Image (cartoon, helix red, strand yellow):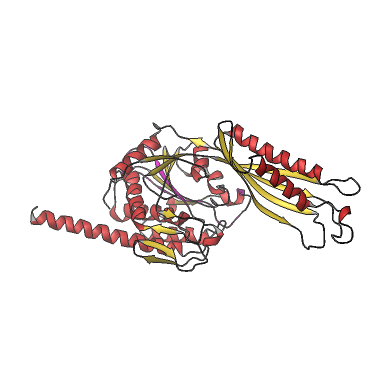
Amino acid sequence: MRKAEMTAVKAKQKSAKSADSAAEQLLLELLAIPAGSGQEGPVAEYIRDHLLAAGAPASAFKTDQAHRKSVHKGEQGNLILKLPGTVRGPRRMLVAHMDTVPICVGARPVKKGKRIVAADAHTGLGADDRTGVAVLLSTALAILDENLPHPPLTFLWTVQEETGLHGARHVSLNLLGKPATAFNFDGQLPSRLTVGATGGYRMNIEIRGLASHAGGHPEKGISAVAIAGLAIADLVENGWHGLVEKQGKRGTSNIGVINGGAATNVVTELVKIRAEARAHDAKFRQRIIDEITKAFHRAAKRVRNSAGECGHVAMAGRLDYESFSLPTNDPSVRAAKAAVIAAGLTPEINISNGGLDANWLTAHGIPTVTLGCGQNNIHTTSEWLDLAEFHRARRVALHLATDLLSR
């Protein structure tokens, strides 16, 4: 190799190392922002400030009213950055969500070798999905800083993903610029292309019994706790709780939250339960919902007091997101495969058993592939981030945005 060529290679390596260092600093700062679902304002401000400083015009930003349409409300809608193309082509969209789960709020991220972890043992890290936020932000900054050629682009940072995909569900489609392809960064491996995901249904169950003194006259009461216990035992014994496999169909259900009772000397009158059912097949998911409903109503009839009275159950639910599956020849799938290969990785097609912003975006008519960005052990205190995968995700994202691999 000639001396001039060696100098050019070294300069390129130095530039890449500098870009990696800058991206890691962005990531550490984003991870340290305490912003759970409904509290994404500081994250959006951080993103906007950095992009404005890099030369993005204020007119390129939009914030929608998704939070006002969410059942949880909140302080901030989805943040959208639209860049006109410097080359012709269909608009592409990159997506990540700004919120974290409660266990990650207040995390103090620290770099340890090739990982980032939480300094405090009692918090998670929040790499889900601040890592994706950083991937999008570093990609947009690279384009602005280096004047890289690109087609029309939309960057979408969503809110309230963790509480039911509400940002993606209520996104203002008219602000997105009609993207033809979309790529959501949220997960572990950038080589893993999630092209489908399950559908999820949330349930609120209210059990009404009858209060009485648990020592003096327990026979006069109707225990809402006993009704709940019988119903849950029924579901477990008959294979309708946890992993559900029936007649070649597969899904999941979970009794996740139980609240009720105030004292041991009172027969509990009221118990409130939150549950969920998931399945890729909508009809089988409805079967799971029906079995949960029947189990609680059966249990209510079984628990009677000395007067022959029984309890009552009220059920309410909503579809949080419908399942989807993209064909292998979908333009978003083809583009994601090409970007992963260009980054020197081997694409792996995946179907998720959890909900993603891609569920709602695809339902809105924007086929969306989800790619990982280094997250491990999410939603736990043992969460950690793989920096090598984070940087691979950045390179894949830059290729998707520009068809270039300059960093």
Give me the residue at 31% from left, 62% from top: 21
Q: Is residue 143 left or right of residue 264?
A: left
x, y percentage for residue 385?
41, 58
Q: Is residue 17 left or right of residue 352?
A: left
Q: Which residues are magenta?
A: 69-97
Furthest-front residue in this view: 237
Q: Is residue 194 magenta?
A: no
Q: Is residue 375 visible?
A: yes
- Please name whichever residue, 187 or 217, is drawn nearer the observer in this view of the structure: 217
Corner quadrant of residue 294 = top right
Corner quadrant of residue 29 = bottom left
x, y percentage for residue 366?
47, 38
Q: Is residue 320 visible?
A: no
Corner quadrant of residue 138 = bottom left
x, y percentage for residue 159?
53, 52
Q: Is residue 77 magenta?
A: yes
Give me the residue at 49% from left, 67% from top: 121
x, y percentage for residue 371?
41, 46
